[in-house]
Image (cartoon, grey):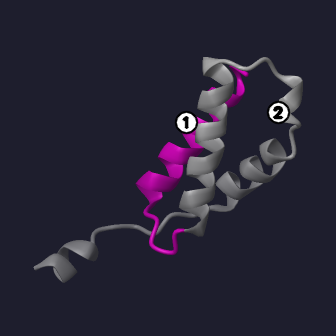
Amino acid sequence: IEEIQKLGFVAGDKEKLKTHYTLYKALNLDLYIDGEAKEAFKDALENAEKVIEDGDALEVDVLEADQNFLMQQCTC
């Protein structure tokens, strides 16, 4: 039954997430003030990296990581 359920899941397209990750990973975070926004951005970077490395990441996971990542970059 578990294998049948997996057929409905769509593998995630990570190209946009990879592009965003590459761009924002290059930022020098030492230039930003320490605080909640900076930590949230760092967490989003870390999460994006995990999703990119996950060979089984689903589309929903990729989209969520990308949206979270993009929302956080605006507050840093």
Which dot marks residue 51? none
Residue 75 picture location, percent across and down: 68, 19
Which residue does the image show at 19% across and 73% down from the upper left? 5
**Mark 1 Cα-neighbour bin, 10 Å: few <14, some 14–19, many ≥20:** some
Q: Is residue 62 left or right of residue 1?
A: right
Mark 2 or mark 1, earlier in chain? 2
Residue that carries the numbered disc 2 in the rendered image: 29
Residue 76 picture location, percent across and down: 73, 22
Range shown magenta: 54-76
Q: Is residue 12 left or right of residue 10?
A: right
Residue 40 picture location, percent across and down: 59, 29
The image quadrant that residue 14 belongs to is bottom right
**Vertical placement of 33 versus 29: above or below?**
above
The image quadrant that residue 10 belongs to is bottom left
Which numbered disc, 2 or 1, marks the residue closer to the eye?
Answer: 2
Which residue does the image show at 73% across and 50% down from the upper left? 21
**Vertical placement of 10 versus 74: above or below?**
below
14 or 33: which is nearer to us?
Answer: 33
Residue that carries the numbered disc 1 in the rendered image: 68
**Vertical placement of 2 versus 15: above or below?**
below
Which residue does the image show at 66% across and 18% down from the upper left? 35
Residue 12 picture location, percent across and down: 50, 64
74 or 45: which is nearer to us?
Answer: 45
**Vertical placement of 10 versus 76: above or below?**
below
- Distance from label 2 to label 1 (Cα)? 18 Å
Whether the magenta-drawn stretch holds residue 64 is answered as: yes
Q: Is residue 70 left or right of residue 26?
A: left
